[in-house]
Amino acid sequence: MAFTRRSFLAGLAACPLCAAAARAEGAHWTYDDPQHWGAHDEAAKACTLGAEQSPIDLTDAVKANIRPPKLGWKPQAFEIVNNGHTIQANAAAGSGVAELDGRKFELKQFHFHTPSEHALGGKRLAMEAHFVHAGDNGDLLVVGSFLVAGAPNKALTALMAAAPKEEGKAAPKAPIDASALLPKEKKVFRYEGSLTTPPCSEVVHWNVFAEPVTVAKADIDAFKALFPMNARPLQPTHRRIVLSGG
């Protein structure tokens, strides 16, 4: 039987982000064998059996009258952590809100993948930032932003300067303008999917900006020196509809 969004919401309603983070920091999974993630942990069966998995190719999107989430992020100093799978910036409680379809989601953290996890026309870009927001009924709103080499980006430069090089280490809080990692053009792709790491819970409202943001190649290289590849393979769409608009 396929794992469904409803079954995961029921099981993870209390704190899906906490459950995901606890597993993500474990040593029982790696990017060397993503096809076996579901075999490592009973709670991660969705990685193998799920029908609404992420990431996907966003190419065949249907144009729709949709707008990107309204983001209300306050300037703040983030805790920068090397969790062994990525560099993650943890937000202070109540410091950021995103609104989608009249519902509010609280910013919990943002992190990075290389190459990008989502693809356009089968092509993956240099990096992708994921801004994770938690809803009040167990679901997540994740905003994605593609990053490519070009003009420097002060936010990524500051973050990589503070990023711990050792797994499990946290740096002193660093002021980061997270909004600088978002494009000016607000065309967005929207679809229903999952976490891209174990337990792969199908509780995510994905909103990925189409226009990439330029960052310094040196910062991309610095991230890749820590994590040469931390992107899950593309997953089947399974007749899901991807919307595009802005």
Image: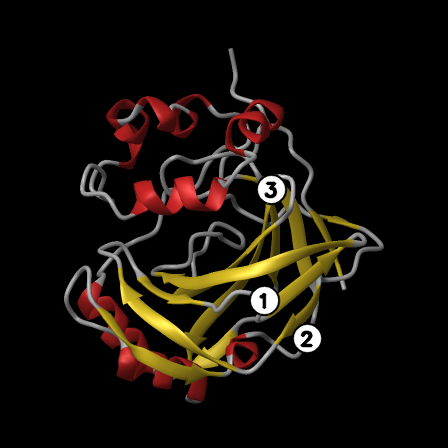
Residue 87 appears in the picture as rendered = yes
The 10 Å Cα crowd at callout 1, few under 14, some 14 to 19, many 20 or more, is: few
- CA gap between label 2 and label 1 equals 27 Å
Residue farthest toward the top in the current orientation of the protein: 1
| Amino acid at dot 3 | Asp
In the drawing, does residue 17 fall left or right of residue 169? right
Question: Residue under circle 2?
Answer: 185
Question: Residue under circle 3?
Answer: 139
Q: State the SS at label 2.
A: loop
Q: Nearer the viewer, residue 213 or 97?
A: 97
Q: Quadrant of residue 174?
A: bottom left
The 10 Å Cα crowd at callout 3, few under 14, some 14 to 19, many 20 or more, is: many
- CA gap between label 3 and label 2 equals 26 Å
Q: State the SS at label 3.
A: loop
Which x, y percent locates residue 148?
43, 73
| Amino acid at dot 2 | Glu
> Nearer the N terminus, badge 3 or badge 2?
3
Q: Residue at x 67, y 44 (%)?
A: 242
Q: Is the C-beta separation of discs 3 and 1 under 8 Å? A: no
Q: Nearer the viewer, mark 3 or mark 2?
A: 3
